[in-house]
Amino acid sequence: MGEHIIIKSESQHQAMRRAGELTGRTLNYLSTLVKVGISTKELDEAAYEFIKKNGGIPSFLNYDGFPGSICTSVNEQIVHGIPSKKVRLKDGDIISVDCGAIVDGFHGDAARTFLVGEVDPEVVKLVEVTKECFFKGLEQAKVGSHISDISRAIERHAAEHGYGVVRELVGHGIGSNLHEAPEVPNFTSVRMGRGPRLVPGMAIAVEPMINLGTRLIEVLDDGWTCVTADGKPSAHYENTIFITENGPEVLTNPD
């Protein structure tokens, strides 16, 4: 948590706007493709082509060896699901798609959880509340606040609905690197304290990962895919945010 936080210049802010805009547009495009029968590999290939065609580079492809341009996490998978020809979406599924794009040397990072066909109302609510958690956090992302103010707002909203808040995975700073300081947890703890104070020029990715049941997770044998320990669904909603004097600017086209 003591790592150096990189403050961005105005030209870097502009580059991050371009990266964020492409990331958001990619997710909007993928939302039109999500349907019963499509494979997660087909979604991955579509994301790759869209990002490249629009002048970007997929942030995730080969990042620490990750084999996809997007993460495709279905139902009980929380994050880091690997796209596969064998995984075809079924009626009633939810799929969390995490996407990043590099433009002019800077990253955008965002995630959405999409509904596939007729989804159980209890799970639809989980997806909606996870998105609400992001916007509760966003309200606190202003100059003078601390990272923990964002964390507390997310945690409180999830807790009101009895959901589990993932602790092993957190949001993060972002810029010319996909992951930078500071960490942006979706929960508060005495150990972490208040966290850094927000100042103009900071860029962070805020990403609630909320489980229908337990907050506990497991990692599958592929070394990437994180799943809920009880097998219940999980939802994910993320945007890249730039801290300005006039309040937070969401760079990745929130839907």
Image (tube, rainbow, N blue to C red):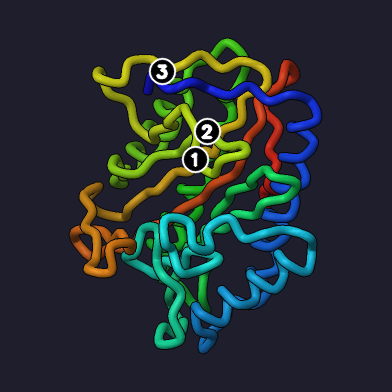
Q: Position of residue 229 (x, y in %)?
A: 19, 58
Circle 3: is it few (<14), some (14-19), or many (20+) Cα within 10 Å? many
Relative side of 103 to 144, left or right: right
Q: Which one is in front, 219 or 6?
A: 6
> In the structure shown, which secondary structural element does the residue marked by tag 2 occupy?
strand
Residue occupying image coordinates x 58% and y 55%: 59
Q: In the picture provided, is 239 more to the left or to the right than 113?
A: right
Question: In this rendering, is residue 210 above or below 90?
Answer: above
The amino acid sitting under disc 1 is His
The N terminus lies in quadrant = top left
Give residue 168's quadrant in the image: top left
Instruction: Where is residue 187? Give x, y as percent.
Output: 34, 32
Q: Does the residue at mark 3 contact the one at mark 1 (Cβ under 8 Å)?
A: no
In this view, 92 is above or below 250: below
> Circle 2 is placed at which residue position?
173
Q: Mark 1 — residue?
A: 179
Q: Is 187 situated above or below 228?
A: above
Residue 150 appears at what percent x and percent y? 48, 27
Q: Are marks 2 and 1 in contact (CB under 8 Å)?
A: yes
Mark 3: amino acid: Gly
Residue bearing the label numbered 3: 195
Residue depicted at 52% across the width and 40% down the height: 134
Q: Is residue 100 above or below residue 49?
A: above
